[in-house]
Amino acid sequence: MLMRTDPFRDLDRLAQQVFGTAAHPAAMPMDAWREGDRFVVEFDLPGMDPDSLDLGVERNVVTVRASRPEPQADREMIASERARGVFSRQLFLGETLDTDRINADYTDGVLRLTIPVEEKAKPRRIEIAHGNGHKAINA
């Protein structure tokens, strides 16, 4: 097998692994959306050992940590393009989310967080008294 080395291409590949690109960020990419009375956040963490995942909450900040170990020392690597080491990401949540009831699930390389909206932040109806009757309005 004949391989050519190009130091500039190797440097570019290293920079992409460390800093990422717009299409492929080095940090764990995520999607977030609202489904009714809850927010859902998904992090792509393919190939991570579930035991290496750590999820912490302090006030309204959620911290996700994961690690992918270095390859075994006795391996002769032909190509090594997957990022390795410890990955960390923080989410700053609004005050209206219930961080005490976050649900986390890791399936098929995707960490999914489900965060419910606090009861006090949900829309509700308030009765307004006027004259002889009551009328309900949205508040």
Image (cartoon, rainbow, N blue to C red):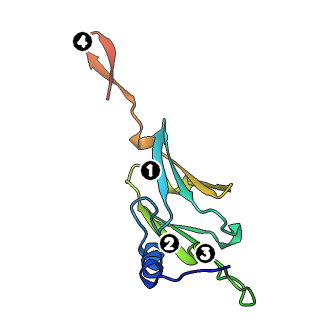
The earlier-in-sequence mark between 4 and 1 is: 1
Residue at image mark 3? 67
Residue at image mark 2? 88
Q: Is there CB contact under 8 Å for labels 2 and 4? A: no
Q: Residue at x 71, y 90 (%)?
A: 73
Q: Secondary structure at mark 2?
A: strand
The earlier-in-sequence mark between 3 and 1 is: 3
Q: Residue at x 45, y 85 (%)?
A: 7
Residue at image mark 4? 131
The earlier-in-sequence mark between 2 and 1 is: 2
Describe residue 48's horizontal placement relative to residue 117 as left or right. Answer: right
Q: Secondary structure at mark 4?
A: loop
Distance CA(mark 4)–CA(mark 1): 38 Å
Q: Secondary structure at mark 3?
A: strand
Place of residue 96 in the rendered image (x, y in percent of width and height, measured from the top left): 40, 49
Distance CA(mark 3)–CA(mark 2): 9 Å
